[in-house]
Image (cartoon, rainbow, N blue to C red):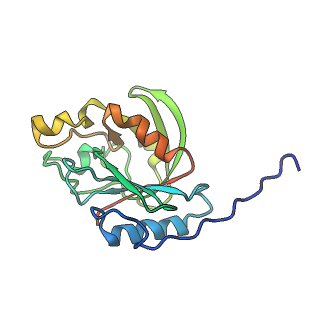
């Protein structure tokens, strides 16, 4: 019937043993899977998710892409906000949901539409938790940036910092967009 949306059958919820990513803390994976269930009405696609482990330094690939159907995983480098790391140590020390904080936020996000902005092609994020529900008004997005390229680690031992956005290396942007698409979970927290 035209105009009538048919809900897709939910995928079975994977357990932590299904995901084969030895670098991902099992407790953080459990929190992300719980967020996937908790926000099921807001997350249209449950086949793939991303998890950012903010307990790892920016010099490590801490953006985990997980295929919940197959259990396969891959990882990328990702920058955090300057307000989360005021001394530029490479570690996210604090988080904020406040405008002007330039800090990263923790919690569950759902990926939104794409647009072209000052960092080129980018993707909007909507925060689903009280810790990140100002993401849209703060313009916290996924984008590529020179300061998130791998050569920053060789030169400085860490990535540069964003204004709270999830910034990946410019050559990795397509990989991120291809994995996530729209309507999927990005979960960010400390393990």
Drawn side of residue 89 relative to residue 178, left or right: left
Residue 42: give x, y in percent of width and height: 60, 58
Residue 59: give x, y in percent of width and height: 18, 47
In depth, the one of 180 and 58 nearer the eye is 180
User: Is 134 placed above or below 108 here?
Assistant: above
Drawn side of residue 117 relative to residue 165, left or right: right
Residue 61: give x, y in percent of width and height: 26, 50
Drawn side of residue 69 relative to residue 60, left or right: right
Which residue is rendered at x = 48% and y = 38% of the image?
123
Residue 101: give x, y in percent of width and height: 31, 46
In depth, the one of 17 and 141 nearer the eye is 17
- Give the position of the C terminus as an image quadrant: bottom left
Which residue is rendered at x = 52% and y = 62% of the image?
69
Count numbered badges in the picture. Answer: 0
| Residue 73 visible at all | yes
The residue most toward the right is 1
Drawn side of residue 97 relative to residue 88, left or right: right
Which residue is rendered at x = 20% and y = 41% of the image?
159
| Residue 136 visible at all | no
Which residue is rendered at x = 83% and y = 52% of the image?
4
């Amino acid at each position: 019937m035209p105009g009538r949306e048919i809900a897709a059958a939910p995928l079975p919820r994977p357990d932590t043993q299904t995901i084969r990513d030895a670098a991902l803390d099992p407790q953080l994976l459990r929190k992300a899977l719980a967020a996937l269930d908790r926000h099921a009405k807001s997350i249209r696609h449950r086949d793939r998710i991303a998890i950012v482990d903010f307990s790892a330094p920016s010099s490590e690939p801490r953006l985990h892409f997980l295929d919940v159907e197959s259990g396969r995983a891959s990882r990328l480098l990702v920058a955090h906000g300057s307000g989360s790391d005021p001394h530029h140590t490479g570690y996210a020390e604090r988080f904020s949901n406040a405008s002007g904080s330039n800090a990263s936020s923790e919690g569950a996000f759902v990926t939104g539409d794409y647009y072209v902005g000052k960092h080129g092609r980018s993707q909007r994020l909507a925060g689903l938790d009280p810790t990140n529900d100002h993401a849209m008004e703060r313009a916290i997005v996924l984008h590529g940036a020179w300061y998130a390229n791998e050569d920053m680690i060789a030169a400085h031992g860490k990535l540069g910092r964003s204004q709270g956005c999830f910034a990946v290396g410019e050559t990795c942007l397509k990989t991120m967009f291809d994995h996530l698409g729209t309507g999927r979970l990005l979960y960010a927290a400390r393990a």
